[in-house]
Amino acid sequence: MNDYAIQLYIELDYIQPKIWRRFVIEDGLNFERLHRAIQGVMGWENRHLYLFQFEDGTIVQKNEDNRGGRFDPRIPVYKSPTNNYVFSFLKVPGTTFQYIYDFGDHWVHTLKVESVTPVELDQILPVCLEGERACPPEDCGSVPGYEQILQALKQPQRKQNQALLDWLDKDFDPESFQLDKINKRLSRMRSRTD
């Protein structure tokens, strides 16, 4: 396909202040490649399983136990992210869906299709347009664990925070959003998949 550019807004649920991104993908991506684009724009490290949840179905990786994905068993499951393409699901602006990453930490992201426009001749996709704040570190214990990290960063002198701060990457800044770095990650993704 690759006829249309789909602009998406993604927000990590249950965290304040918001962690969000606005990015554009081409309509010919399968959901595995959309997953990789989300990993790139959010800053995740692609270490865990994921699923996409729509009102009328779920797209989930094939594995021995999909029950960890916490999806509604009454909703049909489309098990192949590589055989389902975004143009079949994301044609209409206003469409919302969820992306769940890491079934242990259960990071829930809400996405919304903001626009669908013809691809411009010189447009390079995927591309991140804007966003705010860094995503939480991998394997930090979901929202409660991330909140502990934020508290430890505010009070580094407290003895009980030292082990957590020692575990944390020294360069981690929850307020950091580096658009250039994100788009470099996306350009590496393009070179591996094209």
Image (spheres, rainbow, N blue to C red):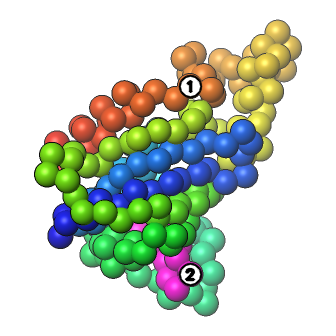
155 vs 32, left or right, is: right
Q: Quadrant of residue 34?
A: bottom left
Q: Is residue 95 magenta?
A: no
Q: Position of residue 151 (x, y in %)?
A: 80, 27
Q: Decide which of 39, 103 is in the foreground and name it.
A: 39
Disc 2: which residue? 55
For the residue labelled by badge 2, is the local secondary structure a helix, a strand or a loop? loop
Q: Residue furthest top?
A: 157
Q: Residue 138: image x %, image y %?
A: 55, 39
The amino acid type, in three-letter code, at marker 1 is Ser
Give 94 or 159, whichever is nearer the viewer.
94
Q: Amino acid at mark 2?
A: Glu
What's the magenta region? 52-62
Left or right relative to 105: residue 34: left
Question: Image point 35% across, 65% down: which residue?
Answer: 116
Q: In the drawing, does residue 92 fall left or right of residue 14? A: left
With respect to residue 28, does 101 lie above or below? above
Secondary-structure class at tag 1: loop
Figure quadrant of the N terminus = bottom left
Question: What residue is shown at x 82% (from left), y 16% (from top)?
Answer: 155
C-alpha distance separating marks 2 and 1: 33 Å
Query: Residue beneath label 1, please?
Result: 176
Residue drawn at point x = 56 percent, y = 87 percent: 75
